[in-house]
Structure formats: structure tokens, C-alpha cells
Image: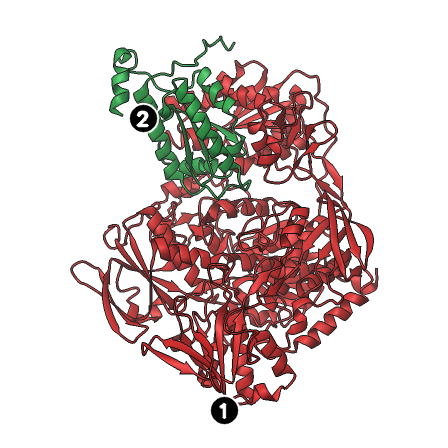
Chain colours: A green, B red
Amino acid sequence: MSKNSELQTPNSKLQTDWEPKIVAFLCNWCSYAGADLAGISRIQYPPNVRIIRIPCSGRVHPLFIMRSLQNGADGVLVSGCHPGDCHYISGNYIARRRFAILKNLLEYVGIEPERVQFSWVSASEGEKFAKVVEDVVEQVKALGPAKRLVKRKADPH
Amino acid sequence: MGRENDQKVGAVLVVGGGIGGIQASLDLAESGFKVYLVDMSTSIGGVMAQLDKTFPTNDCSMCILSPKLVECGRHLNIEVKTYTQVKDIQGNAGDFRVNLVRKPRYINPQKCTGCGQCAKYCPVGASDTFNENLSERAAIYIGYPQAVPLAYAIDRDKCIGCGLCSNICLVDAVQYSQEEQEEVIDVGAVILAPGFEEFDAHLKGEYGYGRYPNVVTSIEFERILSASGPYRGRVLRPSDGDIPQKIAFIQCVGSRDETCGNNYCSSVCCMYAIKEAVVAKEHVREIQPSIFFMDLRAYGKDFDKYYQRAKEEWVRFVRGRVSSVEEMPQTQNLKIKYEMDDSKLMEEEFNLVVLSVGFEPSPGIQTLAQKLGIELNEYGFCKTYQFSPVETTRPGVFVCGAFQGPKDIPETVMQASGAASCVADLLSSVRGSLTRERIFPPEIDVRGQSPRIGVFVCHCGINIGGVVNVPEVAEYVRTLSNVVYAEHNLYTCSQDTQLRIKELIKEHNLNRIVVASCSPRTHEPLFQETIREAGLNRYLFEMANIRDQCSWVHMHEPEKATQKSKELVRMAVAKACLLQPLKRLELPVTRRGLVIGGGLSGMTAASSLAEQGFEVYLVERERELGGNLKKIHYTLNGMDVQGYLKGIIERVRANPLINVYTNARIKEVAGYVGNFKTTIIADGAERELEHGVVIVATGGREYQPEEYLYGKDAKVITQRELEEKIAHGDNAVLNSNTIVMIQCVGSRENERPYCSRICCTETVKNALKIKEKNPKANIFILYREVRTYGFREDYYRKAREVGIIFIRFDEDKKPKVAKGKKALEVLVREPILGEEILLRPDLLVLSVGIVPQPDNKKLAKMLKVPLNEDGFYLEAQMKLRPVDFATEGIFLCGLAHSPKLMDESISQAYAAASRASTILAKDKMEIEGMIATVNEFRCTGCGMCISVCAYNALELDEEKKVARVNEALCKGCGACSATCRCGAIDVLGVSNEQILSLVDAL
């Protein structure tokens, strides 16, 4: 990630105690269960992730990812069943195709590829889930806060 | 109802909580029977729970099993009795009295929340049997993290009675004083699904198991591969934790082996060894797996393709029998001595050796069999007959799974459903007599009310409270808008809190509930039921998982964990504001079945449905019923097939509930589950049939060979033609001096890369028959692999004993057949001698394969179901839904699914009937509330959603030019919604707006 750390230098002072916020869309049947298993196995990972449970990775509309970035998420993770394992037969394949296109678009508008990531985590891969989170957090940290697309946030109250 | 019926009991005992027992229980409970599911261990799940992946799809075993476990555990009409054994059984089919004995687990499972604090503090270590003793657990333990029931047990052999667990347990679940308990239950039928035991590899001393740490059994290796296993999914060898570069798999350990008395083939080891080899290599690319085998028995659906792929890319296959394994003292590597096909002796060093251990009957099964009064076969497996593969020798007692004979998961699941169908046949008159339905108060209409949210934050003992500042979270929650009430509980899931939630809903007029505790995957249904009991719609509920996602994974960062918990609850509250009550639609069910195909499978399925009291339409393309069975005369063990066929045709014809249409074809299929309308043309006349389910039993065909001079020389015939001739006492055949049989004709080739499964058995059957009538006949069988799996192996051995000669040939060195001057000439290369042999047979018999029906494509299109690459129908999921299509209400069985033997077709036909009866048993079916919905004003009718829907649940309304959801078929996955570019299609309960509300509340 040397390229990214260079990008980061100008505002590194601001970022010393900055922690990124990551939104994770996890499918109910595999990845969410994998996150549960990480919990049951007490595998520790950084507390930066906010998990949103969805039925299938195929449920993730590109808008969800865009809106997350707009609303102050510094990174987005989408995770589903391994190819071939989809509870809904082919939802993860559809997701995979959709995200391949979305990634191009995001890169085009200047979102670094590390900010939006996809992975396959099964219900028995608690450790892998923790590892994925660690990797994403580390990579997003190296990028610094998301600036593109971010809307100024209104006071929630 | 007659008097006899009144005495029947509408309950069933299922013995064994593995995947077989689970499937049988679910089928029965869904079709109106009360089920007692009994298992000897502390939880259900059986061996499948231990597996890492499953062949041939490499599905994650736990991922597909765990939803079934939960369903079983929660089903209102399934009583799961763990740690329990059958002591005695009395009575007759329809009315048994069973004595059960429950061992003390020293924990009250009703109180135990499965939080696991006790195990954390337990000072005593014990071997973890779930991990095949490769790791340790505490003396107070749970089988595995996803166990059902999620309740601990104390291993009293290890427990030192220190009392720590009892002091730590906040719900007082520990009960040291528990004693063995007896219980008597009345049931109408029993299904035995006790599974199997792995062969004890110690008995094969030459392989060094137990002496050398780096010799492991296949089930141990399965745990090593598993992400939840002893090494957390890293492929390491036990002696030093190194990655084993070279792994040897030794096949047939405890199978096909007369020295240990297990003459039979264990049927699954070839495939699981390939799977383990492939998965190991997937984990670490550098691993070089080698499989030492005799015959590679990849006989099942899509197995051969899996084998070929492994062979080409991943795994080295060595045809040779390993004689010994020796440890090298310095490295603890293992030296393997083996004999090649051509008798050459070889030696090779490996880092790890995996013994592919075979199946044996479970220990204690003999005692159980005696108590139950059922007969066992010579190997101690359950005795069954060819035409009744799931019936034991005692009426009313049925069997499924590995206890009936070694078999893989799909075969087990099929037999389980099959056994359930036979039970339903027997007990159809008392269906629904003992099942319960939950009665709820009428729903409170919350439409138009502003959200009044109640939030319950759980301490989960100290599981959450020990890290997260729970009172602070509850305090924070009270500041959120729309939250009317918030509190924190020691255990939100405990019985007293459920009552409290119900009271508080009334007291504060709460209309949305949020629980911040553990995983919705395990606890959401419980809370949903609670609020439903208080009159709220079950979908007015949301959960925040602050245990698995906060306290347990950020144990050392309590402040951050607390902060994160607050945010997760804030998100849940934001979503709760938008929750709307959803209706579970009820659809009427036309309680009739359509069976397409009048062969063995179709007739079996139709009679089973009719026995259960459902009307059936049986549609057959030919003039006569019987299909392929008309050409088969006897079975491997000599049973009369034509006699059986005559009997079943008579039964079908005589049954007033079965409407038979012969000389008929399907013209059009419309409708969906519960409400199909099918147009058929029978004897030229069109007819419309209304039915609730479809069973596809269209069968397969014999391959028509063009090779080996078939059709050009009268002496070249197929196995079926041979059988016909033998049955009719054709002397020319029976007096032949020399007969050559060639295997795999039209199978396992580029064009048809699958194994036809039945031909090896058929060949051995016919060869033995000829030998029986004419012992002097010289019979040569030219084969690529003899795949006489299971107990059929006995006949293969017998064939060799009576002097039938087996000569192996390779795929690229097929035998050559030519017309000689006097006789046929067959030239084959004998691999042991390495020379070509010339045979001059009087008769050449081709073992031709099974091909799919040529019109499968047409029917598949009408039914909107898929075919596989080979042209056979493709089921919803190969492992656990072997007779279901992805499209609900349509099932399959027999050769339409893949080539299979008669008894397997019968099991599968019963299975299809059982699955179908889960729909037909009710006059209405409830549709899940979280389904897609179309906003017609936004929809442009582009059809994108239709193209991504895996369930055919969407169609285009031609008139309005908008997409329309078929609520009966939609599963709510949301692929359509995420694809829609107009935002016209959404999923109720997980709508775009609701998901975005979570994002907005970040």
C-alpha cells in the first residue's frame, strides 16, 4: 500500500486518532453466520465494522454502497456465500457481476478500489471473516477518510 | 374411520439425529405427524456436522445443515430428545409403546442459554470428540458451536465436581443431582436412522494408525480441514504442526477386505478422499495429494466429472494396494510400500497418511435390533429387500441412511424422505391427530400509529455485560426518537423476560420491538413469537447483535464495544421506525398430484400418494405401464422382477385414487405450487388436470450403441438383450462356450462423461446367471473400473470365485472387435502381462449406459426446471434437496434424475411422494411475508428482474407491461430489487428504504 500512504501524508496529522467506519453488508446464510462464528469463537477483530444483515449478497443494490459512502462510511464490505454455495441458488453470481461493473464506475469517480471490497465467507469461516475485516480496516486506514461523495451530515436529532 | 384406524397413533419415533433422522422428522412433522427425534449424543447433527465440505459440489457442510438443525429444534411438532436411547418397544405397526431412557446431562437444558461461561472457567480438560480427539475441550461442554439444542452437558467421567460452573451459571442450569430418567411414549411407527461407525483403523496394524501420529483417519482429516477444527482450517500434521507437502490417501481401509470381515464396499470413500485431497490443495497449493486405490468408484451423479477434474488438475491417482506404512524415525515422515497393477513393488515417502476408513454398523446396534425385533444382514446392517428398501423385517419399523447400507448424504436424505412416505402410507388415517397448531390472539392494527418502540438490551449473563456497559447502552437508547421504553435484562431470551416483554407491550402500547442481544439467526424466531403472542405482527421486530459483533469480538476494548453497541442499536431503532406489518398469505392447495411417467418410479410415487389418501394423475407416454422395468427379469439376488411389476401395475390400476392416462403426453403446464393446471393429450383427446404438485418420473433410456459391431453382427448384443434371452431360456446363449462382456459402452466418454452406475451390477448379475446355468462357460469381462458399490461387492467377489475373468482396459486402449473368419475377434491389452490377448467369443455382450430421455428439454421448459450438462434433470441442491426442484411444488425421482438401480429408484420415488405430501397434507399453504413487491407506476417492464430470478417467481404482465410477482414462488432474496434500474421492485421487510435507514443512522 505504499502508493496510498503517500497520498495520506498531507493530512496525516489529523488522522492520528482517526478510526474509519466500515459498513459491511453480509448475507444471512453464509457471511453473517461466519461473523457469528467469529463471535462464538471469540476471535478478536477491530471494532470499525457496522454489520447490516441482508438476505443475499444479490440483494445489495449499488445505491446501498453509494449511500454508505455519502453518509460517512469510509469503506464498504459486501460479503456473500462462496460461488456455488448461494442459499438462493445464484444470487452471489449476480452480485459478483454487478459489483464488477460498479467497481469500474466507482474507480471512475475517484473512489479508491480498497474502499469498496467484496469477499466470500462461509458459515464455517469465522477466522476468515475476522481476517477480512482486519484487512479492510487496515487498507481503509491507509487511505484516510473518504472524501468523495460525502454529504455533509445533518444533525440526526 | 374404522375401528382399526382408531387404534393407530399419529406419532412417529425417529431414532438417530443425523441428517437422515432430521430429514425424516421434518418431512413427517410437515405432513401432519407428531415426531419424537431421539439421539444418543447431546445434540443432533450427526456426522454431517463434522464434515468440512461435501462432494461433488464442495458445499460447506455446516452452511447447508445448520438451517435444518434450527428448523428441527424449533418445530412445534418435533420433540428433540437428546442423550436418549430406546430401551424397549412393544406393540404392532400403527400402535407401539416405546420406553426411552434419558442419560443425565447434569444441566437443565430448558434453563441453559448456551452462553458458555461455564466452559470458560471449567478447570478440567477432556478430549474433544467432535474434533476426533485432536484438540481439547472442558469437562462441561457443547458438541459444537451450532449445536441444537444449544445446551451444555457435563462429562462426569472427567468432572472433578469443583462446583465452579455451578457458581458461575447465572441461570442455575447446573444440576449435579440429575439422574437417569425413563419415559414411555406411544407411536404409530418407528424410523431407524442410527447411522454408522467408522472402521477402527487400529485393526489394520500394518498402516500404523495409533502408533504414528502422522497417520490419521479420513474423518480426522476432515476436522483438520475444517475452519472450526483443531487447527482452525490450516492443513497441518499432528506430530509437529508442519504443512504436509505430500499426503497419501489409502483407500478401502476396512472395506472390501476379507481379513477384517468387511467384504462390502463402503460406497463413499473414493469420493470423500477425492474431496479431501482437492480441498487440502485448495488450502495450500503446494500440497501434493496421492490417492492409492483399487477401483475408483465415482458412480453417482456428477461424480465422474469431479474425479476427472481432480485427476487432471489436482490429485495423483495410483492404482495399487498399499501393503505397509512405516514411520521414518528422524522426520516422522511415512514410507509407504505398495504393489502396482502390474505386480511391481514400489516405495514412496509421504509427510502425512490419511486412511479412508469404511463404514460399520453403529456400536450397540445389535442390542437395539434385538429389542426392536428386526433382522440384520450378515454384516450387521439392517436387512431390507430390493423392492422395499426402507422397510425392516418388522412391520411398522422403517430404516434409512447408512444403517441400511453404506451410502452418501443425498442417498441418505432420499431414503429418509422415503421412509417418511412409507410411515405416512401406514398412518394416513391418523394424520393430524396429534399435531398442534399455535393459536395466537388477533393482531393489533398498528397502521397509522406513529412508532412506539420498546428496546430490550441483554446482558447475556456476563457475555455482553462483562464487556459492554449495558445500562449505559439502555440509557442512550432512551434518548433516541420514537423510543418509548427501554430496559436491560440479565437474559432477554429467558422465559420470564418473554412474559415481561408481553406485559410491557400492553402497558406502554408498544408497536415496534428491538432486542439488542445475540444473533437473529438463532433468536429472532423466539422474539417474533413472543410479540406475536402479545398481538403484534411478527415483522414489527428488529435485532441488534451486540454479543457476536461487540462483546465477544472486542473483549479488550470495552469502551469501543460499548460505543459500537450504541450505534448498532441506533441503526436497529432507525429501521424499526420503518417496519410495517407483513401478511403471510395463505394460498389454497389443490390436493391432488400429477406424476409424469408410469415406470417403476412413477408408479411407486403415485401409489404412495394414493395410499396416503391423495388423488393422483399418472401420465404415461406408452400404451402400457412399466417403462424400463418391462425388460428386466431378475435382480442380483435373484428376485422375480416381472412378478413384482405385474403386482404393482395391478395395484395402480385397481386404486380408485389413481387416474391412469396412457398413450399420453403433456401439452402445457400452467400455474404454480398448490395450483397447477396441466393440459395433457391422452389417446388423442385433450384434458385439463388441476393439481397441487408435480412429480417428474420420466425415466431414461438404454444407450443405442454404434460401436463394437453392434447391429452389424448378430452375436453382438446388449446386456438387456442378453437378460431377455437368459430369461427365455435361449439355448444358443446358455450353451455358449466363450462370452465376452465389454463395460462402459457409451458411458464415461467425452460425449457422455458420466458413469451409468447400473451396468457393472447388471453385468455381474448376468454373468453369474450364465455361470449358474452353464458352469463350463468361459466369461471374460473387460472393464475400466468395477463399480459394484455397497453389498453388491459380494457378487463381484463371487463372480471371481466362480472363475469369471475380469480384464481391465484403459480409456485410451479400448478393446478392438473385428469379424474373424469363424468367430468374432476381440483384442484387448492385459495390463498385468502388458500384452494383447485375443479372445474369440461366441457372444459379445455390450454393457451400454443410460441416456436421458430425448424430450427432457421440452418438458423441462414447460415446467421451468433445469437440466444438467448431461441432459438429466437438475435438482435444487445436490446434497440436501435431492428430489426437490428449485421451483416449489415440483419433484423428481428415478432415472430422470440420474442412472440408478431399482431399489434406489424406489427409495427416491417414495422420497418424492413424501416431499410432495408436505404440500398436499394441508389445504392451505402459508407464504413467507418477506417477498418482492412491484410498484407498477415505476415499472417499465424491461424484464431485468425476470432474468435474475432463480425461482421463476416473476413474469411479465403482457397487458400492463409490468413485472408481476408470484407470491407462492418468491423466496425474498432480493436479486430482482437490486437489479431494477427504476426502483420499481422492492422486498417487504428488507426494503430499500429500510436498508438505507440503517445506513443513514451510521
Chain under callout 2: A
Name the residue that disc number 1 marks.
B776
Going by the numbered disc 2, the residue's amino acid type is Glu
Locate residue B658, reporting x and y percent.
79, 60
Going by the numbered disc 1, the residue's amino acid type is Lys
Locate residue A15, reporting x and y percent.
30, 14
Task: Tell me where residue B965 sits by quadrant.
Answer: top right
Chain under callout 1: B
Locate residue B381, reporting x and y percent.
52, 70
B81 sits to left or right of A133: right
B220 sits to left or right of B582: left
The residue carrying pointer 2 sits among few (fewer than 14), some (14 to 19) or many (20 or more) residues within 10 Å by Cα, namely some
* Residue displayed at 64% across by 65% down: B906
A15 sits to left or right of B532: left
Q: Secondary structure at mark 2?
A: helix
Q: Which mark is residue A138?
A: 2
Contact? badges 2 and 1 (CB < 8 Å): no
Q: Is residue A60 visible?
A: yes
The image shows residue B324, relative to residue B31, as above or below, that is below
Q: Is residue B464 visible?
A: no
